[in-house]
Image: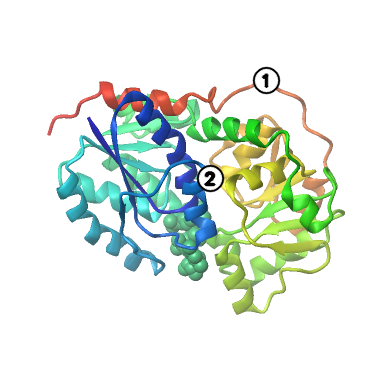
Amino acid sequence: MKILSVVGARPQFVKLAPIHSATLAAGVEHVIVHTGQHYDPMLSDIFFEDLGIGVPDVHLGVGSGSHGVQTGAMLAALDAVFDEHRPDWVLVYGDTNSTVAAALSAVKMHIPVAHLEAGLRSFNRRMPEEHNRVITDHAADLLLAPTQVAVEHLAHEGLAERTVLVGDVMTDVLYVTRDKVAAAPSRLLAELGLTAGSYYLSTIHRAENTDDPARLLEIVKGLAELDKPVVLLAHPRVVAKAATHGIELTQGSLIAHPPLAYPDLIAAALASAGIVTDSGGLQKEAFLLRVPCTTVRTETEWVETVELKWNVLANSAEEIATAVTRPRPPETHAAPYGDGDAATRAVQTLLSKRVTG
Ligand code: UD1
């Protein structure tokens, strides 16, 4: 059995780590293909090093570009890779341009495709990720769903027969990392002279929050006016857009800081008073670490975090201020994202399911 994983963007490297360990444990051959969508060392190499993944077997070096250019370059390059390796499964992750390119390329070559993190929906058709995930789910042969809600979305779209609930692999990697960093204080505290519980941690990178200058300014203003320092772990996209629009990212309470490695991010999140983000992964990580989260979006795919009151959607500066200062949410033992064993279940499912064609 040979599984070929295609990854390209930061959150996919995090999801790859537990899958890679599970393939090793199961004695399965695992080929890792990096599209090159993310290439800055702090968005790419550091994850492979810290999470013990080793180095990718193939690197396509596609880099940045418009959606069409980037996705097209991946499609063009993947044919030869799939042809050379002829895997039993191509495994694609999440909802980026790397995900949809790999799914399309594989189905056109009649190679079975499995989609990890299948069935998420925002129902916001302005998001590039929404199209990527819908197209990928409908193309794929096997849908590895992280939650019961995702299973239900897939059933509504007529995809129940291809769906298996495995849990969320981000829970697997988060629990392992949380236990590793538990004893050591976050490096961010020493660097910025902060104490535990005295700051908020923030990430903002989505196109719908960064591309429109008025929208970005509203968010920056909202963060700059908060009652505690806000450390903004600034993705290159927000840095570039802020520079283009002449928006200062360090102002008032707001302190712009380069992105962190995964263990440092988890340590910094654990020590924070709250998280303000538009990242899907960080919303879930906040919930799993029981740190209150404010999500700067009009909707979320991770509805469980909102239903359990650990996450609040906020868009205007005023809504953000109200949300971050709300009382601590009610304690809960709910585990909508699984028990930390999703990657093993995903690999076992791949081993047990054979697709003909
Ligand atoms: C991509 C995903 C998004 C995911 C995010 C995680 C798509 C459509 N979007 O968004 O779903 O949440 O990754 O981070 O696939 N850049 C660099 N260095 C890099 C990579 C990008 O400077 O290593 C800059 C470039 O200016 C580039 C911009 O960031 O044009 C956007 O990068 P891109 O990969 O297109 O999308 P992300 O915003 O990272």
**Left or right of 295: which side holds 229?**
right
| Total labels drawn | 2
In percent of width and height, residue 324 lies at 79, 46
Q: Position of residue 49 (x, y in %)?
A: 49, 48
In the depicted view, which residue is nearer to us: 225 or 259?
Answer: 259
- The structure residue drawn at horizontal position 22% and vertical position 46%, both measured from the top left corner, is 106
Question: Can you say which quadrant of the picture contains the C terminus?
Answer: top left
Task: Look at label 1 and name its amino acid.
Answer: His
The quarter of the image holding the N terminus is top left
Q: Nearer the viewer, mark 1 or mark 2?
A: 2
How many residues crowd mark 2 within 10 Å: few (<14), some (14–19), many (20+)? Answer: some
Q: Which residue is mark 1?
A: 333
Query: Which residue sits at x=20%, y=39%?
Result: 87
- Asked if one can make out residue 123 in the rendered structure from this viewpoint, the answer is no
Quadrant of the image occupied by residue 160: top left
In this view, 215 is above or below 19: below
Instruction: Say which element carries label 1.
Output: loop
What is the secondary structure assignment of the residue under circle 2?
Answer: helix
Seen from the viewer's position, the closer of residues 13 and 94 is: 13
- Residue 50 tag number: 2
Indicate which disc, 1 or 2, sits on the residue closer to the N terminus. 2
CB atoms at circles 1 and 2 under 8 Å apart?
no
> Which residue is most to the left?
357
Q: Residue at x 58, y 72 (%)?
A: 241
The three-letter amino acid code for the residue at tag 2 is: Asp
Distance between the alpha carbons at the discs numbered 1 and 2: 29 Å
Q: Position of residue 351 (x, y in %)?
A: 27, 24
Q: Dot 1: few (<14), some (14–19), or many (≥20) neighbours within 10 Å?
A: few
Please tell me which residue lies in front, 206 or 44. 44
